[in-house]
Amino acid sequence: MANSSQRDADQMVGNQVKAKNDGGGVCLMSNVWRDEQHPSFINFISNFLCSNSFRLNFVPIAPDLIFNCGGLSVAFAFLTSWECSNTSSIFSRVQKLKKQFANLYVVVVLPTKEQNDSFVQSYFRNGMEIGKPPFVAVQDIEMGFEKIVKIAHSRGACKQQDIISKLRTERKRSVQVMDAFRRVMSSVPGLDDHDANSLNQAIGSIEAIAKASKEYILENTDLSVEKAERIRSFFRDPKLYLSPKIN
């Protein structure tokens, strides 16, 4: 048994090194929870994480596992054994974790009908609110951990998609703002896109350009004296900037 445990530990260390080189997500595992599990199961976890490019670190944390994936942290309470006679302490712990972690899941291994019935009865008896946090029931511990990795990965992927979507929206808005800026500046007689870009980079907004002196424009851009004077006249004469332009 000792030799088997040592082999498991050695293989797990090797997997950690390999996973670190892969640059995937990170799985933080509670020291206390790890010590409560059989070494072969910890080795299974290490292998599974390595194959999915996750690094595994053992740390003193309140939940059993925390996954950092795609810029999102997801916490898990992983109940690998359900004791029908000791359910109140389980739900009390879950309630505490729910207050500490916005993204919390509880994975429960319920291989027998008796355990499943006990879980359902105690769930409502302890005043749990459905879906807060979500509970995931599984048949065995390996299936439970696979579910955990899938949840963490999918939540991380959704977070990444949300970030990408926001970046695309921001870029689209930036392009629209620049187009509007160019349309306004092109209304100034004699100015082209290069002049508009130069003014935008050196001075900034339409309001700032309207307030800028001819000397300031000449000092900070490559525009000619004639163009600087036209800009000054354009923003100071309502007949110019309010009159319709025909392209």
Image: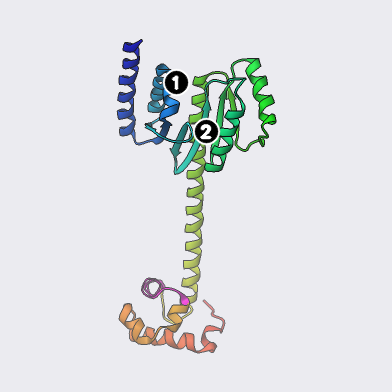
Residue 200: in magenta span: yes
Q: Is residue 217 left or right of residue 136?
A: left
Q: How is the image coloured?
A: rainbow
Q: Nearer the viewer, mark 2 or mark 1?
A: 1
Q: Which of 90 and 169 is in front in this view?
A: 90
The amino acid type, in three-letter code, at marker 2 is Ile
Residue that carries the numbered disc 1 in the rendered image: 37
Q: Do we see residue 79 in this rendering? A: yes
Residue that carries the numbered disc 2 in the rendered image: 151
Q: Is residue 21 left or right of residue 147?
A: left
Residue 20 spot, x, y in % from top left: 32, 33
Q: What element carries label 2?
A: helix
Q: Residue at x 31, y 25 (%)?
A: 13
Q: Nearer the viewer, residue 193 or 43?
A: 43
**Dot 2: few (<14), some (14–19), or many (≥20) neighbours within 10 Å?**
some
Above or below 17: residue 200: below
Q: Residue furthest top?
A: 1
Q: In this view, does 46 lie to the left or right of 95?
A: left
Q: Which stretch appears magenta?
A: 193-206
The main secondary structure of the magenta stretch is helix
Marks 2/1: CA–CA distance: 21 Å
The amino acid type, in three-letter code, at marker 1 is Gln
Q: Which residue is drawn at 51% across and 64% down?
A: 176
Q: Which of 135 and 158 is in front in this view?
A: 135
Residue 58 spot, x, y in % from top left: 38, 31
